[in-house]
Image: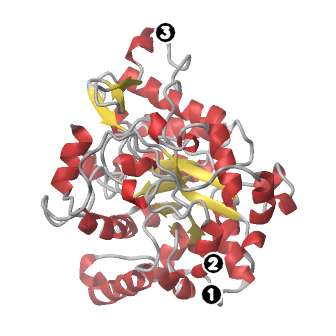
Amino acid sequence: MQADDLILISVDDHLVEPPNMFDGRLPAKFKDQAPKVVRQQDGSDVWTFNGAVIPNVGLNAVAGRPKEEYGVEPTAFDEMRPGCYDIHERIKDMNAAGILGSMCFPSFPGFSARLFAACEDKELALAVVQAYNDWHIDEWCGAYPGRFIPMALPVLWDPELAAAEVRRVAAKGCHSLTFTENPATLGYPSFHSPHWDPLWRALVETNTVLSIHLGSSGKLAVTAPDAPMDVMITLQPMNICQAASDLLWSRIPKEYPDIRIALSEGGIGWIPYFLERLDRTYDMHHLWTGQNFGGRLPSEVFRQHFLTCFIEDPVGVELRHRIGIDNITWECDYPHSDSSWPYPAEDLLRSCDGVSDEDINKITYENAMRWYSYDPFAHRPKERCTVGALRAEAAGHDISIRSFDKGRYEIRHEGISLGEMQARATA
């Protein structure tokens, strides 16, 4: 298959929330308490809410910048591509790259909205979560029907309220809920507790996918505070591996046989060994640990319940049938530092040497449409959805790599450690 003939749906992209997103969306009594953007003395823009200050971390918005400008320092809106936060510019960037559809995870609230959950005033917290979800569904996704897979934030502190919000947004056409990879890390009951049962029931009833992004617990795998940043970046898939193991061995897939879980930004190359390890563990230990999947192997349970995705993963694609061809999707990760934008089709095909057109179509769009109840062809003829057709619409749009550095940074990034990253990002 040629790059121009691909149809690309990315199940893991990100948005940087625009400063005006809460305007007119909160009850009048909460107007002065709404999250807001504040310009700092160093020229960076930060979000403030409930006493917390959340910087726009540089690595989260580097699309279109040269790699030597990547870094973790707080950044400003005028140091990003407008497509990071402006929906109209995002569509232009998607068209120029040939991307038909996109599912966008949040930024400043955290992937599981833990910032809002930490607010002591739970009435305010709920109002902010719902305002965010309405903005995301109605304004971000609604501006261009058929181009986005809507995703909702969870009401993390109350499973009954969380279930009610899932049902509310499902009625608006949203069938993806972002969630934490490990609620216990955030001080909530674990996946092994019945605490979350109302939420699991709501997900099943509304055909909503539990979308779990690495880092959504606020904790990434790292060996030591003074380890180079490269260690943490290399180990990122291990966060998703941990979440997959925790969820698979939990009571959830046994008691909710129709639940579906997406593992976001973890890659797929590790999964064949993971599945072998699951089955070996079951064979050697289930008689004394009490695990029982009703005559099925854990690897079969994984293929029923879990969706995976990758950016560029030749090993994983080569072993795609060991994973399950119906369980693999593609992601672009715009505008993060791992993103393949602006030439994702060409990057993807480097992983797909010898792969049949049938398998490529499943990976690039068919699986995403099926899992997320998403039909872009209801809004746009299929022949206008290819990489080539979209790029033709975006002719003349600037996708050149160019500097956005305002000269605020004197420190370069060689040898940066996790401790230094945390200090710079919160300075």
Q: Quadrant of residue 284?
A: bottom left
Answer whether residue 105 is visible to the viewer in this image: yes
- Residue type pointed to by label 3: Ala
Name the residue beneath numbered marker 3: 28
Residue drawn at point x = 28 percent, y = 49 percent:
189
Q: Residue 144 versus residue 302: which sits nearer the camera?
A: 144
Asked if labels 1 and 2 touch by Cβ distance under 8 angstroms, the answer is yes
Q: Which mark is residue 336?
A: none
Q: Residue 123 versus residue 333: which sits nearer the camera?
A: 333
Q: Mark 2 or 3 closer to N-term? A: 3
Give the side of residue 54 with respect to residue 305, left or right: left
Name the residue beneath numbered marker 1: 353
Name the residue beneath numbered marker 2: 349
Tag 1 secondary structure? loop
Quadrant including the N terminus? bottom right
Question: How is colour applied across the structure in the image?
Answer: secondary structure
Quadrant including the C terminus? top left
- Within 10 Å of disc 1 (Cα), the crowding (few <14, some 14-19, many 20+) is few
In three-dimensional space, the C-alpha distance between marks 1 and 3, rounded to whole angstroms, equals 57 Å
Q: Quadrant of residue 6?
A: bottom right
Q: Position of residue 71 (x, y in %)?
A: 33, 52
Up-down relation of residue 168 to residue 278 (above or below): above
- Within 10 Å of disc 2 (Cα), the crowding (few <14, some 14-19, many 20+) is some
In three-dimensional space, the C-alpha distance between marks 2 and 1, rounded to whole angstroms, equals 7 Å
Residue drawn at point x = 66 percent, y = 61 percent:
9
In three-dimensional space, the C-alpha distance between marks 2 and 3, rounded to whole angstroms, equals 51 Å
- Residue type pointed to by label 2: Leu
- Residue type pointed to by label 1: Asp
Label 2 vs label 3, nearer the camera: 2
Tag 2 secondary structure? helix
